[in-house]
Structure formats: C-alpha cells, structure tokens
C-alpha cells in the first residue's frame, strides 16, 4: 500500500484542493487532507502538485517511431504518394526485433508524457506473425503499460497471415492490461475478396480502421465499388460495436449515421492531418450526429496534451468560430477514452476514486488565479497542457517515472540499443 498526500486532485470530474490518495494496484481511498488519518506507511509528500489520471492514446502507430531522422527521397503531390514514398517503404522492412524496440522507445516517451494506455495500429511487412506479441512484450511486460493492439490488414501483405494474427491475438489476450481489435489499413488497400474473408472470421469483434483520411480514399471507394467507405464496410458486416473509425476527414453524413447506428467511435488525429495536408475532420458534425469522439496521435508526438489543444484550436479554425467547440466537449473526449478502455479491458479507469485503477501522474502546477471544481479543466487545458511534463507517473500502482526519470533501469539499456536496431532498419529500407 502507498499513500500520496498534499496534492490537488482533479480527475476530469471531481476536484479536491488539498487531498490524499491511498492505493495499491487500485485506489483504496481518496479524500481531503482534513480527513486524513495515519495509514501506518510513510506517505509520499506531493508538495502541492496536481494529481491527474494518465492519458490514453486512442490511435497510434508505434512502428513509425524509427522514422525520426530517416532521410528518403520525398516529393509527394498527394496523400497516397506520402504513403508510397515514406510509410510503405518503411513498414515493409520492419521485423519482430524492430517492432519490439519500437515499442520500448515509443513506450518510454509515452510514459514521460503521462500516457500509460495505448491503442495501436501495427504494420510490419517482414514479420506479421507474432508481431503483436512482440509489441505486447515491450509495452505491457517490460514497460508496465496497458495496450489494445491490432495488425493493419491490407492487400499489400499476405492477407491470410494478417487475419490470423488479428484473430489469434484477440482470442488469446483478454486481461486488465491487454486486448485486441481487428486491424484494417484503409478501404483503398482492401479488396472485396479481403473484406469477405475478414467478415467470415471476425464475428462481432470490433475493427480499427482508417476511413477517409484523405479524399482519395473516399473517391477510390466510389470509383471501384459505387458506394462510400462506411457503406462498403457495413455491407460486409464489419462495423461492430466499439469499432474505431479513424480520421474521417472526408466522411459523409450518411456514413456518420452508420457509425452512430453501430455505436462505433470516431478517433480524430488533427495534428497528423495538418502535417499530411489532407484537411481537418468536421468534429462539430460528428457531435451533432451523437457520435462519441476520441483523440489519437497517429504516430506523431507522444504528448497527448498537445493533441487535445490542437483538437480545440483546429475545430475553431475549421468552423470559423470559437463557438464551434467548447472545453466541455473536449472534456467529453478525454472521458470517452477512459470509458472505451474500461470496456475493452474490463476495468475502471480514469477517476481518482475508490476501486479505480491507480493510473495517475503528478504534475507541478501552481495556479496564480483561483482553481476550483468549476474551472479546474480550464486551468489544466490552458495552464498545464501547453507544457505538461509529469514528475511522477504511476500505472497499476507501480511507479514508472520518478522525478522525470524512468524507474526501470532495463528500459534505459534497451533504449540505447535501439540506435543500432534503427540503423539496420534504415539500411534495409534504402537497399530495397
């Protein structure tokens, strides 16, 4: 049992000005310091820091982390050429060793940014089989994170291997730390034959797929199949409850109706959308359709605070009004991520309350205006998110980051070894 005292506690719902938390793997007790009684263990003095639930990254591409510093001929004129000239060259040369070290490096950065649950979309052309197991080893076993994983099925790969990897992982991994989804790349890389194969194996499992990340994906669906992407997925019975429909930059109202009817979630990635110049999602329209929205990083920065900032700012710009999205709606997105992960992992996540998982961070923050229950998220969003760097991060009650340093010394050794692993990857990319 551990105790943290003298902290401001905010869990995106409740606020305690000066409180304490008692925890093991789960939270045992929470309250104001005025009610604190000695627990028989030496407490950790939080020194007035802010205690927040850890972030969830709702759509990541961990395999892409070794693109950092990689120089390739790159002169794309559209989104497909970005994929062809960069990402498809890279993922084609990833093996299981690379996948493991990618997980270590990305996971370390996630921890340093207060992210301890990751929903990832894996791609690795050299090793499909057991790739998710290798990623699980890095993230869950060696780093102590929670993860929901899938492999992006695509006609670029041996389809049957992709299907087996997804189905096998989904069936064998169901715990409070790990689960699987069925991964699919995008409509434009999935033939009808492939969708039919998936539909015969999937059952009622949720999918994780890019939809209309660019207009080219939507145009491809109409040109080849005379229907929208979501109509095509629905035709094959693939839009199951809790599916993740990612991006949706060029998604129609009818497609949003399909998302809503099947109780799927939209996952937006506005920073990546800006980087790829594909446009921005009409988040306001998603909400008008009653769809639950979550936020991912699409493989870019591991700082989810920045992603939430960009969601608000880009939506204001897209709709040409600061009234298009409010802090309350951003707050809903944060809480939607906890709701989703809680369902998928069968846990209680995202509150600093009794019986919830002890997944939280301690962040230095001294407000110079009054902070209370009614304005706490305003402080967090505008005062903390622009430069959020936690001092300490806990997951399942275990301290993963202490004074901004990774606690597990093995991780630092693996992190250093990754330089040679990434060099080997770069060599394969440039030789093929």
Image: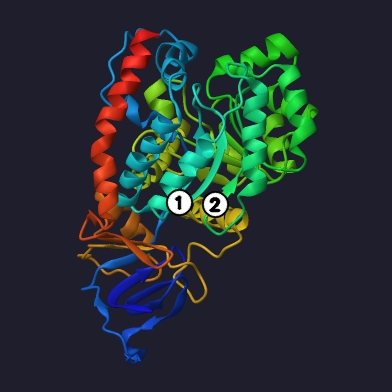
| Residue at (33% x, 58% y) in the render | 380
Query: Which quadrant would residue 95 be assigned to in this image?
Result: top left
Q: Is residue 17 above or below residue 425?
A: below
| Residue at (45% x, 46% y) in the render | 137
Query: Which quadrant would residue 271 be assigned to in this image?
Result: top left
Q: Nearer the viewer, residue 410 or 294?
A: 410
**Mark 2: secondary structure:** strand
Q: Position of residue 19 (x, y in %)?
A: 33, 79
| Horizontal relation, residue 186 to residue 371: left or right | right
For marks 2 and 1, the one nearer the N-term is 1
Query: Which quadrant would residue 289 be assigned to in this image?
Result: top right
**Mark 1: secondary structure:** helix
Q: Are marks 2 and 1 in contact (CB under 8 Å)?
A: yes
| Horizontal relation, residue 57 to residue 159: left or right | left
Q: Is residue 76 above or below residue 366?
A: above
- Any part of residue 251 in sight: yes
| Residue at (47% x, 18% y) in the render | 92
Screen quadrant of the C terminus: top left
- Any part of residue 389 in sight: no
Q: Position of residue 379 (x, y in %)?
A: 31, 59
Q: Position of residue 370 (x, y in %)?
A: 27, 69
Q: Residues within 10 Å of mark 2 (few under 14, many from 20)?
A: many
| Horizontal relation, residue 408 to residue 165: left or right | left
Residue with the mark numbered 1: 140
| C-alpha span from label 2 to label 1 | 7 Å
| Residue at (74% x, 18% y) in the render | 192
Q: Is residue 250 above or below residue 289?
A: above
Residue with the mark numbered 2: 178
């Amino acid at each position: 049992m551990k105790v943290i005292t003298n902290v401001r506690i905010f869990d995106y719902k409740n606020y305690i000005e000066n409180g304490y938390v008692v925890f093991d793997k789960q939270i045992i007790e929470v309250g104001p310091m005025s009610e604190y009684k000695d627990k028989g263990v030496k407490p950790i003095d939080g020194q007035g820091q802010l205690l927040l639930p850890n972030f969830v990254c709702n759509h990541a591409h961990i395999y892409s982390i070794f693109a950092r510093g990689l120089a390739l001929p790159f002169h794309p004129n559209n989104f497909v050429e970005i994929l062809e000239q960069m990402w498809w060259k890279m993922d084609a040369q990833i093996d299981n060793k690379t996948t493991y070290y990618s997980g270590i490096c990305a996971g370390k950065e996630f921890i340093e940014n207060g992210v301890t649950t990751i929903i990832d979309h894996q791609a690795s052309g050299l090793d499909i089989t057991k790739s998710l197991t290798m990623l699980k080893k890095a993230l869950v076993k060696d780093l102590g994170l929670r993860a929901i994983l899938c492999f992006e099925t695509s006609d670029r790969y041996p389809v049957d291997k992709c299907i087996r990897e997804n189905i096998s992982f989904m069936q064998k991994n169901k715990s409070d730390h790990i689960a699987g989804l069925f991964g699919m790349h995008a409509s434009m890389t999935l033939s009808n034959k492939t969708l039919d194969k998936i539909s015969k194996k999937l059952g009622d499992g949720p999918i994780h797929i890019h939809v209309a990340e660019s207009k080219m994906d939507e145009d491809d669906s109409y040109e080849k199949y005379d229907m929208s992407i979501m109509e095509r997925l629905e035709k094959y019975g693939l839009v199951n409850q809790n599916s993740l429909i990612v991006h949706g930059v060029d998604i129609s109202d009818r497609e949003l109706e399909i998302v809503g009817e099947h109780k799927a979630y939209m996952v937006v990635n506005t920073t990546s959308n800006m980087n790829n110049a594909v446009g921005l999602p009409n988040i306001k329209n998603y909400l008008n359709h009653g769809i639950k929205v979550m936020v991912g990083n699409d493989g870019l920065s591991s700082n989810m605070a920045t992603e939430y900032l960009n969601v608000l700012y880009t939506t204001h710009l897209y709709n040409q009004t600061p009234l298009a999205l409010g802090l309350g709606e951003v707050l809903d997105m944060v809480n939607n991520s906890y709701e989703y992960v809680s369902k998928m992992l069968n846990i209680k996540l995202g509150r600093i309350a009794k019986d919830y998982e002890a997944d939280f961070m301690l962040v230095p923050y001294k407000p110079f205006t009054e902070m209370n229950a009614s304005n706490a998220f305003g402080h967090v969003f505008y005062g903390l998110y622009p430069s959020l760097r936690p001092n300490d991060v806990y997951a399942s009650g275990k301290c993963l980051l202490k004074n901004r340093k990774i606690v597990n010394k093995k991780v630092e050794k693996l992190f250093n070894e990754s330089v040679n692993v990434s060099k080997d990857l770069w060599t394969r990319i440039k030789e093929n």
